[in-house]
Image: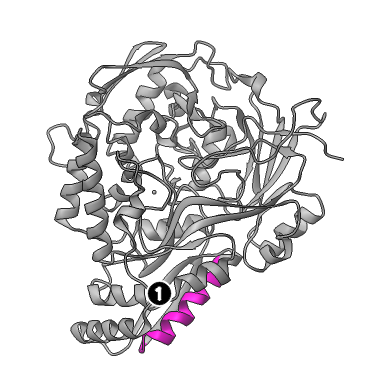
Amino acid sequence: MSKSKWSLLLTLVLALSVFLTACGGKDSGSSQSSGGGDKGKLDDKQVLNLVDTEEIPVMDSAKASDAVSFRVMNNVFEGLYRFGPKDEPVPGVAKSHEVSKDGTVYTFHLNEKAKWSNGDPVTAKDFVYAWRKAVDPKTASEYAYIMAPVKNATAIQTKGDALYGKVDKLGVEAVDDHTLKVTLETPTPYFLGLTAFGTYMPQNEKYVKSQGDKYGLEADKMIYNGPFVLSSWKHNEGWQYKKNDQYWDKDAVKLQEINVKVVKDQATATNLYETNQIDRTALQADFIDQYKDNPDFHKIADPSVFFLRLNEKNPVLKNADIRKAIDMGWDKKGLADVILNDGSTPAYYLVPKDFTKNPDGEDFRKINGDFGKFDAAKAKALWEKGLKATGKKNVEIELLNYDNDNSKKVGEYLKNQLEKNLPGLKIKIKAQPFKQKLVLEQKMDYDMSFAGWGPDYKDPMTFLDMFTTGNSHNEMNYSNKKYDKLIKDALKEADVKKRYQMLLDAEKIFMEEQAISPMYQKGIAYIQKPYVHDIYHHAVGGDYSYKWAYIQGKK
């Protein structure tokens, strides 16, 4: 939910949002209700009030690349399937599907009752248009690569390929208005879950073209086919959802309204909670100790991983010894246990623990183990070796950071640790609003960046394929031919055991080269009013569903 820019997360993300990974009830990869209730008599006023630390960057499913946008999309749009209360795909626009014996052809039967908020029917052509738009090189979609399982998707995006730019060759066909045929490159066990992801959601071609360049940038420049619509979107202030009366399953939707305020400061958010202006908020650091004995307090795990991007366009960071010194030169346990204090755990890896298992039932993380550890003495030696190789005595490195309260504490911690343990290093922190930070990363206009990734689907590939050479989410100039080949071959490998080993080997290459400095695997701490029920948090993709949420027992 990446699931992650969390690609964090990403797909999810402490530094991206106070609310990004703190609104659910998921426990170690499963989804559960974030409140009980017997669904007897509901309150007359079905209104939920929330906070987020960041503005929505964009609402065009073909162009979105961040957790905030995908979370909102998950509630105002709907793909062929969506993730349900048990974190498994349940019918969305598609009421059913069949798969060919060889696992490469999916035939989806669409719900005739599915409509856009303007009354237009949702048809198979809406998916064909949206998917072709996503892979079209002219769109320059950062997330186009997630369409790779669909036949010819990669070729259409590859310069020099005979199919480059020929979107009509994509393996998706509208057999009729309510039948969609999808042909894959190879059997893809996680494909059904992918159809719930933002990039796979439909678009109404006629409407989109009528809005031109404004589509996806304002609430009134979109139509919706999900449980809610965006009734207002005040940039940098907040947005409002309202129940979509055109939604095919509207009887399941109890909330009439959801109000979201953009609040960057933790103290302000908790004050809003205490004064009953909002119904839930994430907690970090000292606030966790303050609320840990409160019955409203909840603490759970998450598969999102945060890390330092190390931009190899910087000649100093191109040196592997320098990168390894940076990774060894700071205490990850201290960050997780003291600064974050929210259940996060130190990360010495890219693919998270308790996320996926091989065909024999072994956890990916247990098989590959950890890479590296905090060792100030060894870090200093590697640092000095790297400086000598680059002809430097003193180095200033800019750390690109988010501008919310908690991220500033993380940035200062890293600065103090690294400057203390690596003589001659000066860290300059550059805090930026979320949207601007994404732009700087896309341009690779930074040295190091505090980043995260939340999974988009339940497979190690969601963490690994973005670091292939030239991938739009690589964003740090990392390149390794052997790594690229492993990922390319794994995308086409039908033997599940061979494929899984390829992914294990790819992570080893990536981590042994210290392409990133892993920071932590996310923990979630939050407070929520007891009258809020059934917000579901998902391990992958759009991280929250409000479709089934309701208010009961508010005084």
**Image quadrant containing the C terminus:** top right
Residue 412 forms part of the magenta stretch: yes
Q: Secondary structure at mark 1?
A: strand
Can residue 472 be seen by looking at this rendering?
A: no
Q: Residues within 10 Å of mark 1 (few under 14, many from 20)?
A: some
Look at label 1 and name its amino acid.
Glu
Residue 141: image location, x then y, percent: 35, 42
- Which residues are the magenta region? 407-424
The residue lying at 52 percent from left, 42 percent from top is 543
Q: Main structural element of the magenta stretch: helix, strand or loop?
A: helix
Question: Which of the two residues, 195 or 291, is positioned nearer the viewer here?
Answer: 291
Question: Which of the two residues, 222 or 280, is positioned nearer the viewer here?
Answer: 280
Residue 338 position by quadrant: bottom right
Residue 250 position by quadrant: top right
Colour option used: one colour
**Which residue is disc 1 drawn over?**
398
Determine whether 432 is above or below 62 in the image.
Answer: below
